[in-house]
Amino acid sequence: MNIQHPHSDVPSGPACAAFEALLTQSLLEPEAAGELRAHARTCAHCRARLIAYDRLDNALRRHVAQFARSPLRTEDIVQSLETPDGSPPAAPQDIARLTVLPSPTTAPAPPRRPGGRPRRVFSWVAAIAAVLALVVAAAALFSSRHPGGPAAPNKGQPAATQVPALPASVYGTAGTLGSDTNGVIFALNAADGTPRWQFPTPQGQSYKLLVVQGVLYAGETDGSVYALDARTGKLLWHIKLPGSPAPEQIGDGMVYVNTLEPNGVNQPGRVALYTLDTRTGGQIWHFDNGGISALVDGVAYVSSNTSTTQSTGTIYALDARDGTERWHFQGQGAVGVWEVAGGQVYIFGEHVVGGALLPSNILYAVDASTGALRWSFPRQPSGDMQPLGIENGLFYLLSNTGSPAPEGPFTTLYALNISGGSVRWQTAVNGGAVLGNNILYAGNDAEDVVAYRASDGSPLWHTGQIPGVSSDIPVIEGLEAQGTAYLYGREGGIYALDASSGTLLWSGGPGQIGGLASGLLITFTYGADTAGAIYGLNPSTGAVRWTYTPTQELARITIQ
Amino acid sequence: MLDQDDPTTSTALLSLAEFTALIERHQGELFGFLRSLVQHQEQASDLLQDTFCDAWYAARRGQAPLVPGAAREAVRRWLFRAAYCQAISALRRRRLLRWESLDAPGAGQWEALSSLASFEDQVVESAAMQAALADLPTRDVTCLVLHVVQGFTAAETAEIMGDSPQAVAKRITRAKHRLLTAYLAHEAADQGSRRP
């Protein structure tokens, strides 16, 4: 072990104040490296630190060297570059396909509205309906923030390197609820919108589509779970579960499926978790009191069956292989895991209180090993909140805590230190925000967008009124790519801004943002009054390159 | 079919043979870089393919530096930038599950560690380093791997990461301190668990 005793060489007492500055300077100017070495000759502390860092560098090099042999064959990579007909790829793709926030591919409807909740009709019927909807939405919300990751190793499953790369595709489902007509699961070529295959289903209404390692998993409202070859649409297996299943996560050769089952008249539905063998669909283990919220490091985080009107909900940390409990954590209202990172589990508690069902939410940071609470924000539940992401050791979230209208738009953007939950910086906003590449894009005022440096909250630019954007909440979702921020406002309409200056590049464009694929910006409208459609836009101009309109209502898309 | 309104199309394009050579030259180091960031074998493979896909599209457009005769170092920086963007995008989409492959290490995988004293030490060092890297923010890991492992200067690392050289130099300094602290903590835990 080469670096196991570096501290024993470091003299006790305070560290040398010059070390960090000299090291930083030496990285910028070669001549400063000589200065650092000269200093280290006379400073035992710095000398020991340099030796320890040298050993650390060598250990890091050895560690990375283990993986410096690509498992892919060059000819396989070359083959994956060709389109199915052997022609060169149809669309250009620049290098920086950056943030996709929030995960755009799983929302069944326009995302949870950061600009404030819809005004509620306060009757018992509406309240019960709202509770049911919130349970479903909460499960979908939390799980959609952790869309399926790559499949975990499984002896019976082909390795990724054996699966030929798929061309970028848009997968979707379309159907008509209550109709005898079959729905479909379909795949489009993302480059030109041409259909690649269709698979008929009884209803075509899916809660979730999951595409992992060349297999598409879909759950239908009739209880069916399908596993299809994502390249051809060929059925691999099919089973039926009670209620309406939604494949949420993949790991350890298992697909984790939440099901929503009816629970009596005027009662919220119950969510249960089933784990299925990815090869056969056979059931492995089952958890009756909640659905999976996240799957990280061999732990399945399950949210209990709790509605937002109930005061306490539970997160269960279960061994992903067999469902045995490691720990559980109780929080306020309907709880769900938003993120697991740096040894902490970030749990979001959503609760509505009083006759007006006002939000009273809270964020918990919990020790991932023990489930012990480390900190919460705010200290007591208050107002509405929406997490945005973690970067620079900061947790970014929107809140309207302290606002005179707690059901209203978000009013404050917070950056919290992830170590203790203290506020590093905060700024007033109006509505939603999106975390880009070290930039936060936020609604500042009506029709105005302001960009902040994510690390310290300093303002970078603001747009002023954006021509053609008639939204009082100018940012709901977006993504940043190739130096361009693509934002979407409450009243619809996409606008593309130069990320460095805020200059408007173009605005308009149909639908809401789905993601980038094959060098195109993929947008969509879900079927409600219309069938819905999927669009491929030129990201430089917003011009529509292709449109796909299903014959029935578009229910869901995912882009791979 | 290329974008009709794309102004960057050049007449001088890399041939498939030249592009294949480029893949062969860089895929190992790019895979190591991606694997360090996402800590996931199969996802790193996918991102590697995506990176070369991006490069291929750019090359088909004649986009510098993916053109015949371009400086190798410029191409290398471009590829690392592309790989970095792929990894960040993947991490931000939160499609990442951290797990270790149960497959046996590939041929030669342990060769790099052959200078170490024992097999047991190799395993401990690698496990502790893996755990320590997992404790660091992605940008810290990126800085360290690009600078320490891949040999990019602070200025080049800054170019790849879209940051200023000063900020990157400061980040490397702090990341080294964090990595050392985290490494020693994990190593101590590993050694403690090995004691009878």
Image (cartoon, helix red, strand yellow):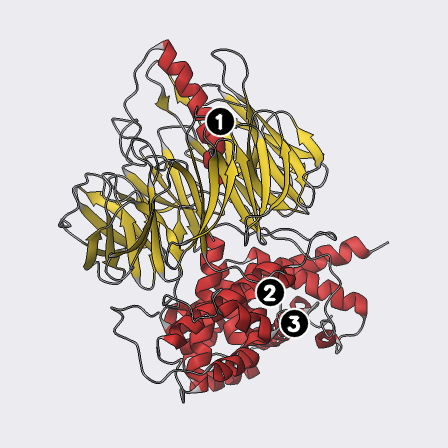
- The amino acid pointed to by label 1 is Ala
Q: Residue furthest front?
A: A181
Of residues A164 and A147, the one nearer the viewer is A164
Q: How many marks?
A: 3
State the separation of the CA atoms marked 2 and 3.
10 Å
- Percent across and percent down for residue A474 are 23, 43
Per the rendering, the mark at residue B180 is 2
Res A383 seen here? yes
B60 horizontally vs A216: left or right: left
Q: Quadrant of residue A123?
A: top left
- Percent across and percent down for residue A126 are 36, 15
Q: Both on one chain, marks 2 and 3? A: no
- The amino acid pointed to by label 2 is Leu
State the separation of the CA atoms marked 3 and 1.
45 Å
Q: Residues within 10 Å of mark 1 (few under 14, many from 20)?
A: many
The residue pinned by badge 3 equals A59
The residue pinned by badge 1 equals A334
- The amino acid pointed to by label 3 is Ala
- Percent across and percent down for residue A210 are 53, 44
